[in-house]
Amino acid sequence: MSNIIQSNNPDTLSLDSPIIFHDPYAFLEQRLNYLGQKGQKERGYCNFSKSLGISSLVISAIASSALPPMAPITLCAGALCYGWSVMLDKSRTGRFRLFPAAPSVQEQIMNSTEDPAALAEINKRRFSSAITHLPPHEYYEAYYMSLFFAEIGEILYDTDVKKRRMLYKTAVRSLYTEGEYSKFYYVLSTMKERSSLMSNVGMEDYGVLLDIDAESIPEEITGSDYHYLPYSEREEEDSDDYEGYEEDYYEEEQGDPWDFRQQETGYQRLKSRWSDSRLFLGEPGTGKSYLLYNVSLALSREGVRVFIIDIGHHEIDDKSTNWNHCSESVICDLSTLSNLEAEREIKKAERLLQNFLKYRGEKLLILEEAAIIFQIKHPHEKKLVSFRSRLTSAVLDFNSRGTKKNGAIYLITQHLKAGMLSDIGKVLKVLDPCLTAVVKGRKAVAKDRNQNVIHKTKAISDFKHNFGDIYTEMPVFEDENETRGLFIDCEWFPMGGPADIGFSPNPVGISKVKWNHE
């Protein structure tokens, strides 16, 4: 809504726009911009006709005083012109307005400010005013779309591609004719209330809210082909990938299932199943970035093209990872950059994302400090809006059911914090959650930070709140040198190290050694 006039491409302005098939969120945004643009034009025509009507009324009044015999005729002519302009507006919009629409005094005062919050409020008021000059059916479409933008986009995304256009037209028609009594209004308002609740409590109980939201959508809205699979049951969907893998660790001859000499390590499990898109949570120093660095390095030597975006980069990270093996990278600390520099880096990140999606071979995209992208408060939050929208759509499309995947997307963050945008909720739906942690009662050496790291519960608590249905308590590995663990594919594994995936042996903990990249 902040940019009402954006696109004049006729292919993106109508309800028959083909973009609805591959990017529902982009379709909604462009449709909303088009309706705002059209509303502004209609308001201009309306104001012009009323101004002419008022002018003719004033002129006829002056003429009648100068020529008293002609007064009835001139006054009637002026009144007819004015009445015609008012009724023309009413016939098009259904609203009875006697005077041209004009900005309020408060809006004129706010218009001179550079405060982003004030400018956003101005744009919101301008949009609300502009759409009142649209025909009724388009007004209700714009009104409800702006009110339930995220919710409509989510339902369209989860609907079969061939049915999206018909579903959208049906929803608009139902909201126009039935308003708040429409079944669509009930579903959308319920989803919005639960999203608001999720935002207020941070990310607690996210999994429960997610299942309730999806199950609350009636079948007559999404169609009989729509099937929502709760997160706790999602593992069964990929059963073909796991067929023949299970091993009975609990037979007597296998011995202790947590014997490090027999059990697969976290490094080995991630590399063997690298093509599943994942979310990595973990406290600082638990080895999540170093894990992905070494696994991606090993994959790059096998022909996988690696991309990385890290806009919350800290210099300390250079001591353990340099990411020279990546085909493309955007690495910076966005919060320290000027507006111009930040805009340049964000555009580079958007190009990298586009290149990743276009590449046809095996590929891996890593997003370090992903929480920064979804923060509500950030020095350059306004510039991040476009990239965040593109990233969310890319993750959802890349991991949608029925899509042939030739790679994966990894998101790394320390916590799921309160105050994060609800957009991350959509992303969490399609990522397999992973957790790194220090074994309870042991100390891990984080050599890049030159400090010992102990077991902490903040990230574990976040994980339990959001993915408690799959979480199991971390075991104490028998090998005392195993100070870290990785929860992946609903199991705990000792973290292991680079040696487990073919590199030369390395001391336990994050090393300062920089590998010679090919």
Image (tube, rainbow, N blue to C red):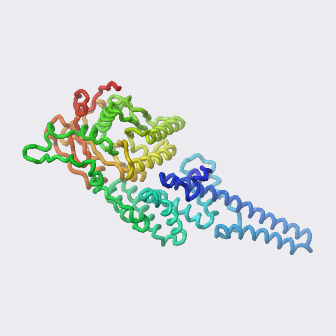
Q: Quadrant of the C terminus?
A: top left
Residue 420 appears anywhere in the view: no
Q: Quadrant of the N terminus?
A: bottom right
Residue 132, located in which quarter of the rendered image? bottom right
Instruction: Locate residue 240, reporting x and y percent.
Output: 27, 50
Spot the residue most to the top: 516
Judged left or right of residue 447, residue 135 is right
- Above or below, 498 against 160 in this view is above
Query: How many numbered marks have been drawn onto this rendered protein structure?
Result: 0
Work out whether residue 112 or residue 197 is closer to the camera in this orientation and state it. 197
Residue 466 appears anywhere in the view: yes
Judged left or right of residue 434, residue 163 is right
Instruction: Locate residue 29, reporting x and y percent.
Output: 53, 53
- Above or below, 417 against 296 in this view is below
Residue 177, located in which quarter of the rendered image? bottom right
Residue at 71% x, 65% y: name it.
99
Residue at 25% x, 37% y: name it.
267
Instruction: Locate residue 209, reporting x and y percent.
Output: 35, 59
Judged left or right of residue 332, residue 298 is left
Judged left or right of residue 441, residue 160 is right
Residue at 51% x, 52% y: name it.
26
Instruction: Locate residue 170, reporting x and y percent.
Output: 50, 66
